[in-house]
Image (cartoon, grey):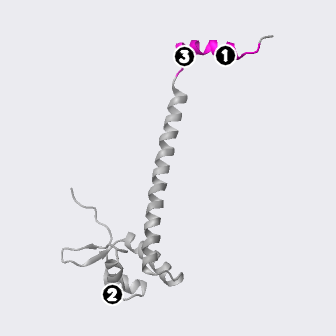
Amino acid sequence: MAKAKRAAFMISAVAEQFEIHPQTLRLYEREGLLKPSRSDGNTRLYTEEDLERLEVILKLTRELGVNLAGVEIILNMREKMEEMQRQIESFVSSLNTEISSQRARPVAKETVNSLIPVIELRTPKK
């Protein structure tokens, strides 16, 4: 199966766009904060997702003064929260499907007949 082509940017273009030194990008990769793909010639290629992640890293470090260890913790927590959000959405979706199927299911005559004595017991006598 062929890979879908995605836009990818070389390290020099990314460094220029974000006004950082290419060594900073290499440091982020060594620290595990960024994971660019590689070309056949072993050139780092940054995707749109990598650039979005880099924006978060730079905002945390430049504007909020977070060190790289803190950035790693924050990014890991964000990933865990996103995964939990996906699980919650999946659970709610399956719950809604189950509720819809329960509402659409006709009640069997035997079920109604089995409930009649219970209803009669609970009905106050006059």
Chain-order first, disc 1 or disc 3: 3
Percent from the top left, x then y, of residue 116? 63, 13
Residue 75 drawn above or below residue 66? above
Dot 3: element: helix
> Would you name the residue on which mark 2 appears?
23
Q: In this image, 65 relative to 53: left or right?
A: right
Can you tell which mark lies on residue 111?
A: 3
Residue 5 drawn above or below residue 86? below
Magenta region, main secondary structure: helix
Residue 13 drawn above or below residue 3? below
- Residue 93 or 47: which is nearer the viewer? 93
Percent from the top left, x then y, of residue 72? 42, 73
Q: Residues within 10 Å of mark 2 (few under 14, many from 20)?
A: few
Q: Quadrant of the N terminus?
A: bottom left
Residue 21, image quadrant: bottom left
Dot 1: element: helix
Can you tell which mark lies on residue 119?
A: 1
Q: Are marks 1 and 2 in contact (CB under 8 Å)?
A: no
- Residue 62 or 31: which is nearer the viewer? 31
The amino acid sitting under disc 2 is: Gln
The amino acid sitting under disc 1 is: Ile
The amino acid sitting under disc 3 is: Thr
Chain-order first, disc 3 or disc 2: 2
Cα separation between marks 3 and 2: 72 Å
Q: Residues within 10 Å of mark 3 (few under 14, many from 20)?
A: few
